[in-house]
Image: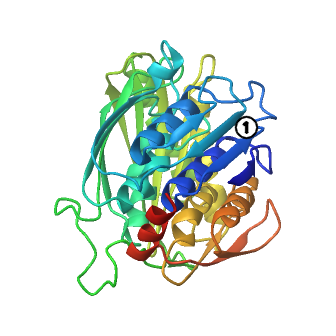
Amino acid sequence: MIEIDGSFGEGGGQVLRTSLTLAALTGQATHIHSIRAGRRNPGLAPQHLTGVLALASVCGAVVEGATIGSTEVIFRPTSPPVAGTYDFDVTDAAQGGSAGSVTLIFQTLLLPLWAAAGESRVTLRGGTHVAWSPPYHYLERVFLPTVARMGIHAEIALEGWGFYPVGGGAVRALVGHQSPVIGRQSSDDHSPFAIRTLRLVERGALKRVSGIAAATKLPANIPQRIANRATNYLQDNGVKADVQPLRERGAGPGVGLFLTAEFENGVAGFSSLGEKGKPSERVAEEACLDFLAFRGHADAAVDMRLADQLLLPLALADGVSEFTTCRVTQHLLTNAHIIRQFIDARIEIAGEEGAPGHVTVHGVSFTAESAKDAESRQ
């Protein structure tokens, strides 16, 4: 059984998510202790518990410690990931309303379901745009287009907006390497599971900046003010942007700005969420400042959030990948450590924490043969 210290490094939910994903892919029983030990409310929150139970259903895992607040989980897969139709609701774990992030749950499920033989249709209900997690539009416009270049294909659709604290949103996803709807790798690939390497070292020139300022159950003038301020703020800094105001339906009130920056060789995303007492102008400026800071790092091809999200699929790729990022984060360093506990991928991170970095990943090539090995262990 692999032993994982949940308090290591960044010590948040990412330790749990990466461990669960790799346990499901490799078939290795895993014991995770001290989960989120340093947080104000340690242990499993509703979104973490939902992720545990969701992945357990995908790979038939026997789980111990799957309760709200638990700081220790034992996860024993009994089968390789199985494609199918799945429906997971964070409110089931919370026993009431919750804005637990469904985007983080999706990222936990993506690789196991992509590696499964067949197509999966997944519905996730909860928070779609909440703090400390990638908003839906980041997955749609930044994360998924980037991993698609590696041969990992998925489609997602926003069925309902879910801002903190009410949640109540929904995301539908279609995942499957064999799906004609999604597309698959060419017949030249030696395995239907093979993940291609990725090189994102130079981002190239900025092509365009677009975005949406969206609000639910709030006056229409609020997203309009955010869009106007963002457009003017960026223009004052020499960037022309197309930011559209949207007033959408949702279970509760919420507002946010989501910017996408398209470069010649890649894409980056920046967001800011509103909260009670936070002026619309500040919501606009936070996301804009985040983008402008990234633009200032001319040698960085990947934003700091995408950097740690790419690490796991790159560790399973067939060969050597590399990318540059604007900031080496504790999330990135922690994710690298957890990955090394499960597989023999060599991850080299050049750069100090908080500074720009160059990441090289020598993948272990997760293939159909790897899946068979995992099945034999189970």
| 160 to the left or right of 18 | left
Q: How many marks?
A: 1
Question: Could you tell me residue 55's position as x and y percent?
Answer: 46, 43
Q: Position of residue 303 (x, y in %)?
A: 59, 61
Give 376 or 336, whichever is nearer the viewer. 376
Q: Which residue extends farthest bottom?
A: 188
| Position above or below: 334 against 347 | above
Mark 1, Cα crowd under 10 Å, few <14 / some 14-19 / many 20+, is many
The image's colouring method is rainbow
For the N terminus, give its image quadrant: bottom right
Q: Could you say which quadrant of the image residue 278 lies in? A: top right
User: In this rendering, would 338 be left or right of 225?
Assistant: right
Q: Position of residue 177 (x, y in %)?
A: 29, 64
Residue ID for mark 1 = 35
Q: Is residue 271 visible?
A: yes
What residue lies at 48% left-to-right and 12% top-to-bottom? 96
In the displayed structure, would residue 80 be above or below residue 195?
above
Q: Residue furthest left?
A: 180
Give residue 148's quadrant in the image: bottom left
- Tell me, yes or no, if residue 210 can be seen here: no
Q: Residue at x 82, y 35 (%)?
A: 38
